[in-house]
Image: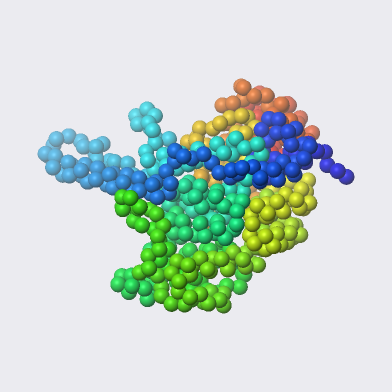
Amino acid sequence: MALDPKFTAALALHRFGFGPVPGAIAAIADDPRGALLAELERPGAGQVAAGNLPNSAQAARAFAEYRAERLAQRKLLQRAKQQAPAGSGDTSAATKPEGDAQAPGASATNNGQNRPPELPALLVQNEAQVRLEAALSAQIGFVERLVWFWSNHFCVSTDVSLSMAGAYEREAIRPHVLGRFIDMLTAAESHPAMLIYLSNAQSMGPNSVAGINNNRGLNENLARETLELHTLGVRSGYSQADVTSFAKVLTGWTLISTLVPAHGGEPVFFKRFHEPGEQVVLDRHYLDTGFEQGRAVLADLAAHPATARHIARKLAVHFVADEPPQSLVDKLAERFIVSDGDLKEVAKALIVADESWTPHRTKLKRPFDWHVGALRLAGARGVIARFMNGQALLGEPMWRPPAPNGFPEHEAAWIDGLAQRVDVANSFAGRVAERVDPVALLDEGLGPLASAETRNTVARAGDRVQALTLLLMAPEFLRR
């Protein structure tokens, strides 16, 4: 039996986008699949207007200067304290400078008066504002969802790469989100944010010039996570020897010190860090060609059938179900292989596959998607510091995954956080309920997806705040 076109449209907006804005269900009801495919062909898809934002190297240099200045201030205050005459008064307030980095997203106050965030928080907030605006302004948001998927797949963290995390997404992920996987893979693994996050910046071949002179050796983090998380996946046949050899290949992939005025923070290949000689990875021999040795290994990893299967399953899990149909995974993997890792073609295969359109909506939205969906439905723009604080409360702080495997996808990781969603939904409803009609928003946001029980629950709410909270916490709004 054919589904109601509006049901399919609402399904498309929740499963593949960020949820409807008013009028969106009706706008794409004639051809929901066609609307998703058309978004892939939109000029500039996946890109953002960020001409006012620094690139990763500029941000890193600014952050390095900030830390140096703060250190100097602390030392001057300490000298003043030491030189002050005995009994000259309490100087404790003057000698308690703040930490180097204000927590990203936190609102700073001074004796109750608001003040602008300092540089570390500002770098993250400005990048987050651009990311949030792209999600809020999208008609559907399929391409933006792909950006977020790949940014989580190749994740870095502000806990380690604070100044670069947002720029990393713009530089390594967005340009390739509808391009070839090998290009995104190379851009991500060689980006300074990733080299810092996975500790490759200081990795030295034990027989390299720097390794011998400094009595230092390998760090295998980047090699291991590239194999396990970014390409082949676990239990795909690689060995510890492959990890070690690959780590030797990646020695020399580093960045210029952020203290260098003109080019600090930029990626560079330092030959004196690089382990000399041929290396064997997955039974393939790679001659010592410096930086190109690493690119050659990445190219072979990108073309490996295990990578296709790993990526295919992750996409299916992210968009469709925690346990997706194997037939869908097979279709995506085949398209990945046949298209030589063309990510636009893989995205098209996801939309075309009938298995992607099951009407059973079992996938719990991650906090980010749910939070953005609430803003979109109510027509709210969001104050970025408040949004980021909400994300931290919900357990998915902006660009701060708990581990290199990114934020988890499965329901078990998020179901216990629904109580926090109630708090966020109620706070949000209290700010916007006076200017929206929750009953009308139910039709705009869920349409045919809404059950009779949900409709009755929202209609019978005591007031608009309660009604909107109940709508945002309805099972139909929480799931894809």
Quadrant in which residue 217 is drawn: bottom left
Q: Residue at x 52, y 60 (%)?
A: 186
Residue 462 point in image, percent of width and height: 68, 24
- The colour scheme of the drawn protein is rainbow
Q: Is residue 46 left or right of residue 197?
A: right
Q: Given the current orientation, which residue lies at the most extreme top position?
A: 434
Q: Residue at x 52, y 37 (%)?
A: 387
Residue 442 appears in view: no
Q: Is residue 387 left or right of residue 80?
A: right
Q: Given the current orientation, which residue lies at the most extreme left position?
A: 85
Q: Is residue 63 left or right of residue 175?
A: left
Q: Given the current orientation, which residue lies at the most extreme front position?
A: 43
Residue 6 point in image, percent of width and height: 78, 36
254 relative to 52, above or below = below
Quarter holding the C terminus?
top right
Residue 426 point in image, percent of width and height: 59, 32
Quarter holding the N terminus?
top right
Q: Nearer the viewer, residue 155 or 402?
A: 155
Residue 312 point in image, percent of width and height: 67, 59
Q: Residue at x 75, y 41 (%)?
A: 32
Circle count: 0
Q: Residue at x 48, y 46 (%)?
A: 166
